[in-house]
Image (tube, grey):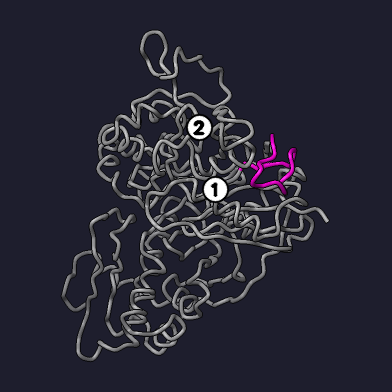
């Protein structure tokens, strides 16, 4: 039996799955938690990876591994391979003003044309601009910029600070993949190359791609004889199916052998699409800490309005995506308010009629990314004596969460992306009420795959691709199929409230 492994280094935890290359069956798995917060020392991810690998029984019998990770996070390294400051994560919104400044300078349409995205606070470029403006001393120390999965891959291969790794700080060994690079706002999914001008506009420093001939620095401050800082190193972008290798065994990971292959890795949503076997025409709605709607497209997309991010996927196609900040935690908040668990919340919701008696929850509890309203709050509309019941409030919570995601699907299809089937994943998808209400809100059949570590399995499938030279076709089991049950009035009343019918009856 040939084994491969996949890693999901997500916002909340690190998961490792070991999979049989031939059948796709999970042989064993492990996990470890990540700290909370929107700015995290990457050392915590490394410690969690070590612990998760140990929990999975080690990787001594694994022939290839790949790492998927949360997108956008800014990992800045100095010339000695040390992290310059805590990584700013996708959900850190302090760079909202920096995003607005970049869009004002370049133009939304031009950004969309060149990178497929319009910068918002989530993207790496905006965090670099924030670093330049608010921490210039740290910005001056930056010798390389990478993303969470890039940094973990680099460390796995034996690189890092001299006193923490066998091979030391070889910044030119940094690699990434097209899916994660496309979330930086300085990479073109169409050309497959970095837009170095946009990187320099963000950080105020020139950059070069790892592996390109570097100009030797004149002194430890990384400046040449004219006083100009040396270019910042960006990870080399591996093609789908390409791999590198473990170049030296890491003492903390003594079970992972030198010479084992390391796949290109991926952003978390691209890895989920790979794990689910998503193909052109498929749309995936993921309801976790954040909500995402993404579809596999054969062609790149560009949305000057910024609602749809025109990301690349991990297979060589494209992954137009809409993200919302408010997803499963909407249900957490309303369940706490009602004093029930999620199962009872679902039972209450299914006891109410579609439309929740006119109650509409606009669920912007934590501001919102799509639409871009970072300072917004949640609002409950339509309260009447007759409508104010526990059942209607539970239903309104699920409908409001899903209506925001359905708006995202509309934005994707308006760009000409065909959709023929919908898969619902994430922790909230396991609730039968969520799947049933989704069939009502989206007005189309809904499939819920068997619960599993779809992101980690996608990374494992990528590792298998690197090892076997072809992407394996692993079956994905279905837990629930819900037929379409369209009730367009649900979205109509949500749209009315969103458009400004505040406090009025529909």
Q: In this view, does 237 lie above or below 286?
A: above
Judge left or right: residue 216 versus residue 473: left
Judge left or right: residue 133 versus residue 127: left
Point out residue 496 in the picture as x, y percentages from the top left corner: 24, 69
Q: What secondary structure is the magenta-colored segment mainly? A: loop
Viewer-nearest residue: 413 or 112? 112
Counting residues from the start of the chain, the first of labels 2 and 1 encountered is: 1
Which picture quadrant has residue 133? top left
Q: Is residue 330 above or below residue 76?
A: below
**Which region is colored magenta?**
247-264
Q: Is residue 30 above or below residue 466?
A: below
Point out residue 82 in the picture as x, y percentages from the top left corner: 47, 34
Residue drawn 67% across the image and 36% down it: 244
User: Residue 46 — which label?
Assistant: 1
Judge left or right: residue 19 versus residue 377: right
Check disc 2 and report the residue beneath it.
81
Residue drawn 25% across the image and 68% down it: 378
């Amino acid at each position: 039996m040939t084994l491969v492994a996949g890693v999901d280094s997500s916002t909340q935890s690190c998961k490792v799955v070991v999979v049989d290359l031939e059948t796709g069956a999970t042989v064993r798995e492990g996990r470890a938690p990540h700290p909370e917060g929107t700015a995290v020392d990457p050392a915590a991810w490394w410690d969690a990876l070590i612990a998760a690998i140990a929990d999975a029984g080690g990787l001594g019998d694994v022939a290839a591994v790949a790492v998927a990770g949360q997108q956008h996070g800014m990992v800045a390294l100095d010339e000695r391979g040390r992290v310059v400051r805590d990584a700013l994560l996708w959900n850190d919104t302090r760079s909202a003003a920096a995003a607005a400044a970049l869009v004002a300078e370049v133009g939304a349409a031009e950004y969309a044309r060149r990178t497929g995205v319009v910068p918002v606070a989530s993207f790496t470029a905006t965090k670099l601009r924030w670093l330049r403006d608010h921490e210039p001393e740290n910005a001056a120390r930056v010798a390389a910029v990478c993303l969470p999965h890039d940094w973990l891959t680099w460390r796995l291969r034996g690189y890092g600070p001299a006193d923490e790794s066998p091979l030391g700080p070889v910044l030119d060994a940094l690699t990434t993949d097209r899916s994660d690079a496309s979330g930086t706002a300085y990479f073109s999914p169409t050309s497959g190359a970095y837009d170095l001008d946009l990187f320099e506009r963000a950080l105020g420093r020139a950059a070069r791609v790892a592996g390109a001939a570097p100009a030797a620095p004149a002194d430890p401050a990384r400046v040449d004889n004219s006083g100009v800082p040396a270019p910042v190193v960006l990870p080399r972008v591996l093609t789908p199916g390409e791999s590198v290798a473990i170049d030296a065994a890491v003492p903390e990971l003594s079970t992972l052998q030198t010479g084992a292959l390391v796949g290109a890795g991926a952003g978390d949503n691209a890895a989920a699409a790979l794990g689910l076997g998503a193909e052109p025409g498929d749309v995936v709605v993921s309801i976790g800490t954040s909500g995402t709607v993404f579809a596999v497209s054969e062609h790149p997309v560009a949305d000057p309005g910024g609602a749809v991010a025109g990301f690349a996927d991990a297979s060589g196609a494209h992954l137009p995506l809409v993200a919302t900040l408010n997803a499963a935690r909407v249900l957490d908040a309303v369940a706490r308010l009602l004093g029930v668990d999620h199962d009872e919340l679902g039972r209450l919701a299914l006891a109410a009629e579609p439309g929740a008696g006119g109650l509409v929850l606009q669920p912007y509890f934590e501001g919102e990314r799509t639409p871009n309203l970072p300072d917004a709050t949640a609002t409950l509309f339509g309260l009447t004596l007759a409508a104010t019941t526990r059942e209607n409030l539970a239903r309104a919570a699920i409908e409001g969460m899903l209506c925001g995601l359905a708006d995202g699907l509309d934005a994707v299809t308006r760009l000409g992306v065909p959709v023929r089937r919908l898969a619902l994943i994430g922790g909230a998808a396991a609730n039968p009420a969520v799947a049933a209400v989704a069939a009502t809100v989206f007005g189309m059949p809904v499939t819920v795959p068997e619960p599993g570590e779809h992101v980690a399995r996608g990374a494992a499938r990528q590792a298998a691709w690197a090892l076997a030279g072809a992407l394996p076709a692993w079956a994905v089991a279905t837990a629930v199929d819900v037929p379409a049950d369209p009730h367009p009035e649900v979205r109509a009343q949500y749209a009315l409230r969103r458009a400004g019918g505040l406090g009025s009856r529909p």
